[in-house]
């Protein structure tokens, strides 16, 4: 009961505007946008395997993984939460994870389809070395368009999302 009350408190104090969200995503990121339809199936599968295997099954949060992350003190964030994290600056860092969960479950899920969320995530994510967006990463690391990526290249780029500066192919 206390957890539900706390969640309601966080929800009531979280300000979120979808236009601000979209503007923050686009700010200072020189990207070439790729539509969901242009994303290779191998890339989609690699990203979901690495980042959020239950992405198409949950509504913003995989609650069992989310609750386990508090118990295990791990860094679980659904792909939806990671997308919110890209654009949401939370000056009150206290309870940031709970705020991101609220935004991903109650705001992003109402505005976007799952395909659109995955498209946004791949187009605005950091792939290391100040490279933002899947098309820029494909061109930088493999000198080819996203639509031309093979399975191995897709796996490399999906792996970069977890720790872009640690897993750099240039190290």
Image: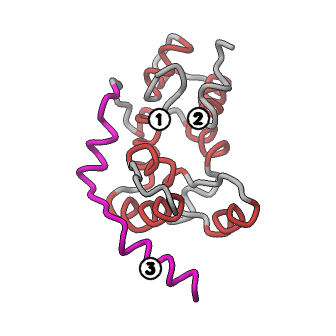
Assess whether mark 3 and mark 2 are in contact (beta carbons under 8 angstroms): no
Residue drawn at 56 percent across, 13 percent down: 142
Residue 141 horizontal side relative to residue 18, left or right: right
Q: Is residue 28 magenta?
A: yes
Residue 71 x %, y %: 74, 66
Q: Secondary structure at mark 1?
A: loop
Q: Earlier in the sequence, mark 1 or mark 2?
A: 1
Residue drawn at 61 percent across, 41 percent down: 45
Q: Residues within 10 Å of mark 2 (few under 14, many from 20)?
A: some
The residue singled out by tag 1 in the image is 125
Q: Nearer the viewer, mark 3 or mark 1?
A: 3
The residue singled out by tag 3 in the image is 8
Residue drawn at 55 percent across, 63 percent down: 61
Question: Label 2 to label 3, Cα distance in Å?
Answer: 31 Å
Which corner quadrant of the image does residue 106 belong to? bottom left
Which corner quadrant of the image does residue 31 belong to? top left
15 versus 33 height, above or below = below
Residue drawn at 42 percent across, 49 percent down: 117
The residue singled out by tag 2 in the image is 161
Q: Residues within 10 Å of mark 3 (few under 14, many from 20)?
A: few
Residue 155 horizontal side relative to residue 147, left or right: right
Residue found at the far right of this picture: 72
Viewer-proximal residue among 75 and 104: 75
Region of the chain picked out in magenta, as a range: 1-29
Question: Label 3 to label 1, Cα distance in Å?
Answer: 29 Å
Residue 64 x %, y %: 67, 69
Q: Residues within 10 Å of mark 1 (few under 14, many from 20)?
A: many
Question: Label 1 to label 2, Cα distance in Å?
Answer: 7 Å
């Amino acid at each position: 009961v206390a957890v539900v009350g706390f969640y309601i408190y966080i929800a009531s104090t979280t300000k979120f505007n979808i236009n601000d969200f979209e503007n923050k995503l686009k700010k200072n990121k020189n990207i070439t946008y790729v539509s969901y339809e242009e994303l290779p199936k191998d890339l989609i599968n690699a990203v979901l395997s690495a980042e959020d295997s239950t992405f198409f099954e949950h509504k913003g949060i995989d609650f069992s993984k989310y609750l386990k992350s508090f118990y295990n003190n791990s860094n679980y964030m659904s792909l939806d939460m990671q997308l919110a994290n890209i654009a949401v600056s939370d000056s009150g860092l206290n309870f940031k994870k709970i705020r991101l969960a609220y935004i991903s479950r109650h705001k992003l899920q109402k505005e976007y389809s799952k395909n659109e969320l995955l498209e946004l995530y791949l187009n605005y994510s950091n792939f290391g070395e100040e490279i933002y967006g899947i098309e820029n990463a494909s061109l930088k690391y493999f000198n080819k368009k996203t639509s031309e990526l093979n399975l191995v290249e897709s796996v490399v780029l999906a792996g970069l999302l977890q720790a872009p500066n640690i897993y750099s192919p240039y190290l």
